[in-house]
Image (cartoon, rainbow, N blue to C red):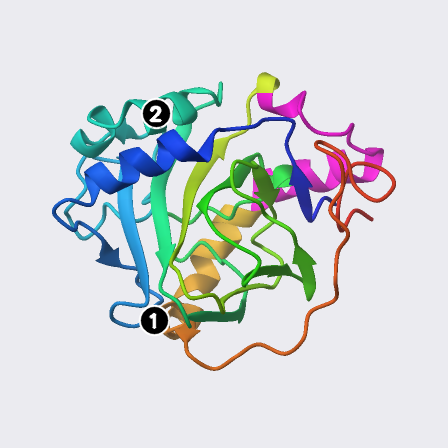
Amino acid sequence: MIGAYRLPLRFDPGPLLDDVRRIESPPRSTDHWAGTTGEWGVIPLVSSDGNHDTPDSASFTGGGAGRATALLAGAPHLAAAVGEFRAPVLHARLSRLRPGTVIHPHRDYGHIGDQRFSFERGYIRVHVPILTDAGTTWRLAGERIDMRAGDAWYVNVCLPHAVENASTTERIHLVLDLELSDWLRRLFPPESVWDRARGIVLRRFERPLWKLVKPILKARSHRAYASRSPLPAARDQVTPPEGQDRADGTIGQR
């Protein structure tokens, strides 16, 4: 199972940030549903209905590929970055964290849209940092992932993950929810026989089972993850070459 993987893609963060600043005038960010007011903001670029200012536009709500919002239509560099991924784009958004904000360890359970995102499930989440620095920490299963501006990182958000912005500037990422295509699969290391078998089981049975247990866990979907309480120290992770890791091209593969 792949925990995190730096894709062999690279983006120039400068023009992307220029687009962000144009979009933000006037400010358009809405609070993430699991955050507290003003700490963790979202600006939808691709949404299920093509809107950027409705209650459902901030997250993937189910169905197939999303539609570009008017904000993306006016942001050519962001649009080009989204279009670089030759796969169905279910949702795309700008995610920003104010200085001092902490998103505590949690797993994404698919409370909205009933879909969990990991490679073996056939749907993935990719982060493209646009504005970040060494004071921002992204952790997966307690291990620090060195996300640098312009990188493209796949992260298995079904595993425990956390973020801390301990810097003095905001952190801005382009976050994409994608359905795996043949083109995307070729960017990843080959799957093991066990991972292929596990993926078949998850794709066939997880969503129906989740719909049965979701009402039991519904209260957890409204828990606020973001706060100002600092995270404990992380295990350092040496930055791998692009598309590689310490040994075999992945972080957290087993």
- Counting from the top left corner in percent of width and height, residue 29 is at 22, 53
The percent position of residue 210, horizontal first and vertical second, equals 49, 55
Q: Main secondary structure of the magenta part?
A: helix
| Disc 2 packing (10 Å; few <14; some 14–19; many ≥20) | many
- In the rendered image, the residue lying farthest to the bottom is 229
Which residue ends up furthest to the right in the rendered image? Answer: 247
- What secondary structure is marked by label 2? helix
Closer to us: 107 or 203: 107
Residue 242, numbered label: none
Residue for badge 1: 222
Left or right relative to 242: residue 48 = left
Is the C-beta separation of discs 2 and 1 under 8 Å? Answer: no
Query: Which contiguous range is marked in magenta?
Result: 184-205
Amino acid residing under circle 2: His
| Label 2 sits on residue | 77
> In the figure, 223 relative to 213: above or below?
below
Task: Please indicate, yes or no, whether residue 65 appears anywhere in the rendered image.
Answer: no
Q: Is residue 147 above or below residue 79?
A: below
